[in-house]
Image (spheres, rainbow, N blue to C red):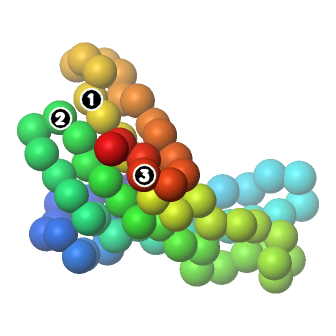
Amino acid sequence: MTITQGEAGATVVVTRTVSDGARRRGTGTLWYADESAIGLDTVVTESIPEGACAGVGEQALTRVDDDRLRHEAGTQAGS
């Protein structure tokens, strides 16, 4: 996962995943950010084989402390 800076509405995350014969690439668009969390709307941009990977949709990364982030995925993540 690569996370970059950006404004709300910008693509700020690129993901690459390989597992059990499937490869997936995706992007995340920033929908909110504050001092302790970011919210993303993610989509699958490439799935090999086609249709092998599903998107998660809304995701949130929340700072737990200096060394850890909490990840939430699915409807209303981070709400």
Circle 3 Cα neighbour tier, 10 Å, few/some/many (<14 / 14–19 / ≥20): few
Q: Position of residue 15 (x, y in %)?
A: 52, 61
Q: Is residue 19 above or below residue 6?
A: above
Picture quadrant where residue 28 is located: bottom left
Is residue 51 placed above or below 79 in the rendered structure?
Answer: below
Q: Earlier in the sequence, mark 2 or mark 1?
A: 2
Picture mark count: 3
Residue 14 is situated, as x and y percent measured from the top left of the image, at 44, 65
Q: Quadrant of the C terminus?
A: top left
Q: Can you see residue 1?
A: no
Location of mark 3 (residue)? 76
What is the quadrant of residue 51 in the picture? bottom right
Q: Which residue is mark 1?
A: 63
Cα distance between the residues tagged 2 and 3? 17 Å
Q: CA distance from mark 1 to mark 3?
A: 18 Å
What amino acid is found at the position of numbered circle 1 in the picture? Arg
Closer to the N terminus: mark 2 or mark 3?
A: 2
Neighbour tally class for label 2: few under 14, some 14-19, many 20 plus, Cα within 10 Å: few
Placement of 49 over or under 40, stated as above or below: below
Labelled pair 2, 1 in contact (Cβ < 8 Å): yes
Callout 2 amino acid: Ser
Label 2, label 1: how far apart the Cα atoms are: 5 Å
Hey, which quadrant is residue 41 in on the image?
A: bottom left
- Residue at 45% x, 58% y is 58
Farthest residue, direction right? 21
Q: Which residue is mark 2?
A: 36
Q: Residue at x 83, y 70 (%)?
A: 52
Residue lying farthest to the left in this orientation: 35
**Amino acid on which the number 3 mark rests in the picture:** Gln
